[in-house]
Image: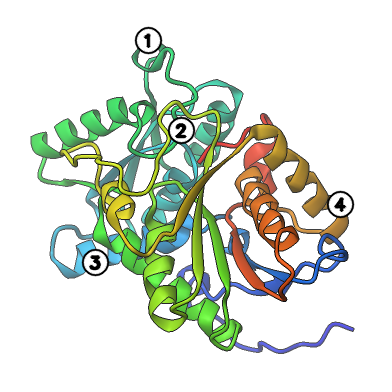
Amino acid sequence: MYEMTDKKIHDSLLDLVGNTPMVRLNNICADVKSEILVKLEYLNPSGSLKDRIALEMIEEAEKSGRIEPGATIIESSTGNTGFALSTIGRLKGYNVTIYETMPGKAGSEKMKMMKNVGAEVRLIEPEDIEGLKERSIAGSEVELPGRQLCLNDEKADSNIWWARQFSNEYNVKSHHITAEEILNQTDGHVDVFVQSIGTGGSLLGIGEVLKKACPNVKVIGIQPASSKELWHPGMDFPATEIKGGIISKMLKSDAVDELVQITDGEAREMTHRLWREEGLHCGVSSGANVYFAMREAKKSNKNLRIVTLLNDHMNRYLAEERYVT
């Protein structure tokens, strides 16, 4: 039975960023010894874990004196970060401009969402990303035309601030808090952590904290098998003004043990199971996370505690169900 537990009136929607609940998968895990715990990041205000980084990056820029309300925040985004920055930026009194780099129906849907909350959305011309549709991991080529435009805009106008999600240290630091929430919810017991790679911020940030608290934890990063640029630990990926950043640090970090690939079909299959068997209205990258978490559970005879994130809401994938990050 439902019980009322929170009587507080929040002063702002920003108070609801983070502190997301964790749920045990019961039906999907009925035939395995291990348990899979999922953290419901799609319950953040704009519908994804990217609210965490948007709020942290903006507030740190405010503290440093780089921006104040009335300035313009810009970013190159394939969706979730753009919508998070649009939602939180507008709420805090900023103009927001997003260079949208996701082609096709999914991109059009996300553009509409960002426009609806007051952002200016500039679509990268198709010829600039021709042949790069599948290069979805941040740092890959599909991101670069928009990042170059962000860099140009920032250099031309001191009232413009580029959030630099791909290299901003507060992207990673925001997920140190996510990790502390996980440790609190699990009483400090995590055997395996699984997360899809976008900018790499959540995987690296959570991995750094979990490794200190649980030295034997296995941290696994997931990437779409369709991507043309696939990562492996120790890979040399030099950083530039528009490339590298967090991904470069992640590849050289001891906080990540393994990087694996998941296909669209595998991610979609598990996403549909989460909808139907667990009632969890998450997106396809979440399905990828749970698919691999189940693979880890099935190959072990131990009672492992496997934790992963449900990154975003299913409404991001109504036009097109593809595993992109």
| Marks 2 and 4, the one that precedes in the sequence | 2
Q: Residues within 10 Å of mark 1 (few under 14, many from 20)?
A: few
Q: Position of residue 253 (x, y in %)?
A: 30, 59
Label 2 sits on a secondary structure element that is: loop
Vertical comparison of 128 with 287: above or below: above
Is the C-beta separation of discs 3 and 4 under 8 Å? no
Q: Looking at the picture, which amino acid does disc 2 mark?
A: Ser
**Camera-side residue of 299 and 62:** 299
Q: Three-letter amino acid code at disc 3?
A: Glu
The answer to whether 77 appears left or right of 274 in the picture is: left
Q: Are marks 1 and 2 in contact (CB under 8 Å)?
A: no
Q: Nearer the viewer, mark 1 or mark 4?
A: 4
Of residues 39 and 260, the one nearer the viewer is 260
| Marked residue nearer the N-terminal end (1 or 3) | 3
At a point 60% along the width and 63% down the height, the residue shown is 308
Which amino acid type is marked by label 4?
A: Arg
Q: On the image, numbered disc 2 is attached to which residue? A: 136
Question: Along the polypeptide, which appears first: circle 3 or circle 4?
Answer: 3
- The tag on residue 60 is 3
Label 3 CA crowd tier, 10 Å (few <14, some 14–19, many 20+): few
Q: Is residue 45 visible?
A: no
Q: Position of residue 228 (x, y in %)?
A: 44, 26
Secondary structure of the residue carrying numbered label 3:
helix
What distance separates the C-alpha of mark 1 from that of mark 4? 39 Å
Which residue in the rendered view is the most extreme toward the top? 127
Q: x, y (%) of residue 214? A: 47, 80
Q: Which residue does the numbered mark 4 point to in the structure image? A: 276
User: In the rendered image, which quarter contains the N terminus?
Assistant: bottom right
Q: Is residue 249 left or right of residue 2?
A: left
**Mark 1 or mark 2: whose residue is earlier in sequence:** 1
Distance between mark 2 and mark 4 Cα atoms: 27 Å
- In what element is the residue under mark 1? helix
